[in-house]
Amino acid sequence: MAELRVKRGKIISQEMTVPGDKSISHRAVMIAALSNGPCLIEGFLPSEDCLSTVEAMRSLGVQIDVVSEAEGLGPTALRVHGRKGKLSCPSEPIDCGNSGTTMRLMSGILAAQSFACELTGDESLLTRPMKRIVEPLSKMGAKINARGSGGECAPLSLNCGELEPVHYLLPVASAQVKSAVLFAGMQTSGKTIVTEPAETRDHTERMLNYFLVKTARNENDVVIWGRQIPESRDFKVPGDISSAAFWVVAAAAQAGSRLLVQDVGLNKTRTGILRVLIRMGAQISEVVDEREQGEPFGALEVKGGDLTGTEVSGDEIPNVIDELPILAVAAALASGETRIRDAHELRVKETDRITAVANNLRAMGVMVQESYDGLRIEGGNRLRGARVPSYGDHRIAMAFAIAGLFADGETVVEGAECIDISYPGFEDTLKKFASSKLADEAKRKTNADAELSESDSDSEGSVGGDDGNGIEKG
Ligand code: S3P
């Protein structure tokens, strides 16, 4: 099992990009596969999760050609040959791997096809709640069965056919469930409405509109009309703000640091992390690029400083749901208390992220209280390097690699291979951060000094230490 070894980092002075957005990459492949012709998808994220979607679509008869690859990482530009809404019966159960997005969104697509099929996945995916998909799709007339634990989990059997439109009130604020119902609704003969209890990421609606499928938004209602086939188009996936979040926190929590992230997605339903960090005292600015292609994107600049604790709760939760592990690390580095509430959904992610974060922060010497739907974190004390498990969860592994940059001694993240689920190349970037920080030492000093004299602040308050800067995989 791969171990990621991280030692204390130094002040960051970096310009970077991050790989393509995971949520958008899944949707781009799915919508292109349903479209009426070839679509070039650039900036595709070649991660294990997104490749599960590519393989699922291939097993359904969709031709997907690799147009270009990033060195050692896999395909980053794909040509997807749309099948005008009609897929072919797969010869085997479709393996969604670790990807909840693949399983839930594909269910919505498959529910209206004219063949029976089965969706399965890895050990973690087979424990995640699927009743939330079964319920709305059954209401639309799909014959869908969760055959796993207590009739609530995958494998899912679908015996598909004609669907009826529905007006569905989401019991949980979930973009995955909303998207599954919209994909199913697009294949009915009428108008489907999904009402969200709180706003969730809107990539499906945006991308459908970009592919000329008509949808509408009316307060909390999202409407889609049936009998629509996406019009084939080319699409460029922006960088993933959820991947950028790790570096953004690393820079924001270190006085004297400066980070510029280019070409990153800046969709408001995903940038909640920036608003929370700004509330904690971080200096972050965004510049949105004018050449929007269905999704806003642009540059993010972060200047490090002292953070203070905050509360994250209520309607803000769906907008930061994937960033809560790294926000919990930011909270440990901030002075004072941070409360995270209303985040019970974290318990049913790739692992129980509330318990995973609490255990790992405690191992690093942080005072944490866990509640059913959140955490109370006492920040501001020095972190202690420790051996921490990833729990097979990519975001836990990356969040604690970043925590290791701020800890005394060495932090070892066990089971770090899961990082490839969403961020192939994370480790190389972590190394580059370290080496370029070393190489940039002199420049950094000059910058930090210049900033010091400009802002008259005290950079000695930063967590930067001198006991090495190594990152190794063991
Ligand atoms: C996603 C939605 C979120 C998020 C997941 C990706 C998506 O899940 O946690 O990583 O692409 O729609 P929920 O919809 O279950 O909240």
Image (cartoon, rainbow, N blue to C red):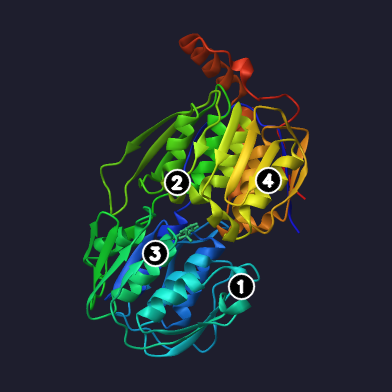
Lower sequence index among marks 1 and 2: 1
20 to the left or right of 424: left
Q: CA distance from mark 3 to mark 1?
A: 22 Å
Disc 4, SS = helix
Q: CA distance from mark 4 to mark 1?
A: 24 Å
Look at the picture and state if 333 lies above or below 68: above
Q: Amino acid at mark 1?
A: Leu
Look at the picture and state if 54 lies above or below 68: below
- Answer whether labels 4 and 1 touch (C-beta < 8 Å): no
Q: CA distance from mark 4 to mark 2?
A: 20 Å
Disc 2, SS = helix
Lower sequence index among marks 2 and 3: 3
Look at the picture and state if 123 lies above or below 267: below
Q: Which residue corresponds to mark 2?
A: 314
Judge whether residue 431 can be spotted in this image. no
Lower sequence index among marks 4 and 1: 1
Q: Which residue corresponds to mark 4?
A: 358
Q: Which corner quadrant of the image does residue 337 belong to?
A: top right
Q: Amino acid at mark 2?
A: Gly
Lower sequence index among marks 3 and 1: 1
